[in-house]
Image (spheres, rainbow, N blue to C red):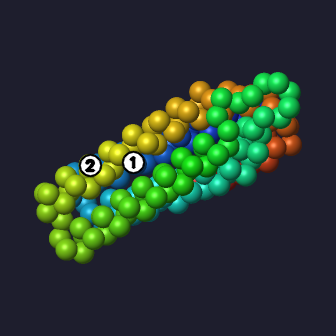
Amino acid sequence: MSVSDTLCILRHEHASLDILFRRHQEMLVSHAWARAARLLTRYQERLTVHIRLEEKFLLPYCNNDGSGSSPRWGSHVYRTEHRKLEELVRAVIVRLTSARRRGVTPAMLIDLLDKERTLKHVVQHHHEREEKGLFTELHERLPLETRMELSKELLRVP
């Protein structure tokens, strides 16, 4: 499997995460609260797996390797963004859980969607950074064995 095949799978996973989150929001505006909550939990699980795979297989290769070609952003930037994404998803889950417990009002739904807009913005910015920076920079750096292992793990994600 080539580097571009592996990175293509990662880009596809980004798109799949976006679709899953959109389905969650469709359930919110349809007032299907339980289904919206299940989809959001599923989104959190998939995002967590995706982050762990990137941190295990990609981030070790995005620091300066002494070759003179320095990466645009170091691993600390991606890790910081990953922690922010995890924090935002948790905050959205807490808000939805609280709203469901008290009975979702239109004001609560608007508040929740506003919080989700922030999450979507950060996710979009992060995915763009990875696709234009990390994935492109790793095209030449990622060893075959790492690519194969990462691809195998990615293909296990339902």
Relative to the observer, which residue lies in front, 109 or 34? 109
Q: Could you tell me which residue is drawn at 19 percent across and 52 percent down?
A: 110
Q: Does residue 58 appear to the left or right of 86 in the view shown? A: right
N-terminal-most mark, 2 or 1: 2
Instruction: Give the x, y percent position of residue 123.
Output: 46, 42
- For disc 1, the marked residue is 119
Residue 5 visible in rendering? no
Relative to the observer, which residue lies in front, 115 or 34? 115
Q: Could you tell me which residue is drawn at 76 percent across and 45 percent down?
A: 60
Does residue 52 sit above or below 12 in this rendering?
Answer: below
Secondary structure found at label 2: helix
Which amino acid type corresponds to the residue marked 2 in the rendered image?
Asp
Which amino acid type corresponds to the residue marked 1 in the rendered image?
Leu
Label 1: how many Cα within 10 Å (few below 14, some 14–19, many 20+) = many
Q: Could you tell me which residue is drawn at 59 percent across and 35 percent down?
A: 130
- For disc 2, the marked residue is 114
Does residue 125 sit above or below 116 in this rendering?
Answer: above
Does residue 56 sit above or below 124 in this rendering?
Answer: below
Instruction: Give the x, y percent position of residue 109.
Output: 20, 56
Residue 78 visible in rendering? yes
